[in-house]
Amino acid sequence: MRTLLIAIPFVLAAAPAMGQFTAPSSSSVKERVSGDFITGPSVPAPQAGDQLAAFAGTRIVGLYNFTSSNVASSTTSAGTGTGGATGQTGQLLLRADPGREGTTGTTGTTGSTGGTGGTGATGGTGATGGTGGTGGTGATGPTGQTGPTGQTGPTGQTGPTSPTGPTGQTGPTGQTGQTGPTGPRDPAGTVRTPFSIVIFGDDTNTTSTVEGAAKGAQIRFQFYKSSSNQTRTDVRVENTAGEAFNYTYNGTFVPPFPIEIPGFDLTPTRNLNVRLGAVGASGPTGGTGGTGDLSKYDLNGDGAIDMNDAAFLLRIIAGYGRPETAQGLQKFDLNGDGRVDTADVVEIISRRQR
């Protein structure tokens, strides 16, 4: 049975301050985060030489370097958000009902035709002359008078036109649709700088080394300001609606492509924003380029501070997997007293999150 080593009286030398984040180990397991790096009116916008780093526990797993070209694409808000879409106007509920057409009046009857006048009487036959000399021709009798033409009957009256039916009432106009919600609004002076960072994960096919973040590990970001040599941990991940987002790693294996084709990338991408100067986050630390106040207690890099980290440190104290150099032991001196012992285990237990 191995005896637990209670204390290691090992004095650690002070570590030199880091000027910037170092590049992470590359891996075939990865995912990309693309979005806007957001700074508020009172927070300086990123400049060329600044860096954004992703951490899984104390391990750096992604790095983005701001350059003059990508900083030039920043946009500054005037303080007006993007309004929601206006609702559609409702349709008419009723249609106009035209009145019925009146019927045509009846045609009057035609008057009767007057009767034809009677034929005048034929004159009498002249008397026959005596025999001997030819008698004179008898005079022609007068022509009888033509009877009068009958009067035309009166024209019948036109029947009355039926009245037009009443016009139907117009239906009420439909209600106007509701105005859509207003999009997230940035205060005046907010600067958005596009960024895209590849975050590497641990390849489970290689058991000898840990290349990056484990599946499901919580990813935190830190920002290095080169002009003031400051590392800031008050960085928050947000979704596109501006809400705080708990970002856990979900990288996948991306096989190498034999031919490099510009613009062709199989790396899965998540659209998230990163905001510097988030309320409630820890403030900047002077030029260490290291980890935040709590991330150093996450020794196994699973994104949580719990009893697994305490057990991890106890194994180190007992001699299992203990680094052989002072620099290797330095990160386990959590209370800064120059020793790695059970007092550092207490530091983890007092800050555990579950």
Image: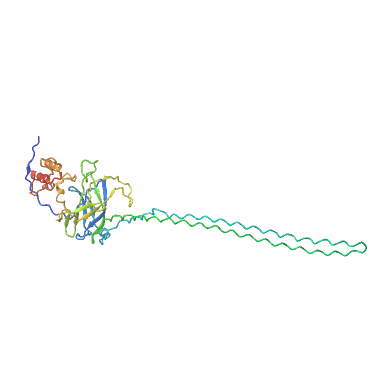
Q: Nearer the viewer, residue 149 or 189?
A: 149
The picture quadrant where one finds residue 229 is bottom left
Closest to the observer, 330 or 343: 343
Q: At 26% from the left edge and 48% from the top edge, which residue is drawn?
A: 31
What is the basis of the colouring in this image?
A: rainbow
Q: Quick one: 323 or 185, which is closer to the camera?
A: 185
Q: Give above or below for 115 relative to 348.
A: below
> Residue 186 location in percent, x, y?
24, 58
Which x, y percent locates residue 199?
Answer: 24, 49
Specify whether 128 is left or right of 95. Answer: right
Q: Is residue 341 above or below residue 111?
A: above
Q: Nearer the viewer, residue 63 or 25?
A: 63
Residue at the image point whose x is 10% and y is 42% from the top: 317
Residue 147 in the image, given as x and y percentages of width and height = 71, 62
How many numbered marks, from 0 up?
0
Residue furthest toward the right? 132
Quarter holding the N terminus? top left
Q: Is residue 166 left or right of residue 207?
A: right
Where is residue 240 drawn, in percent x and y?
Answer: 26, 53
Q: Please state if 84 lies on the left or on the right of 322 as rendered.
A: right
Q: Quadrant of the C terminus?
A: top left
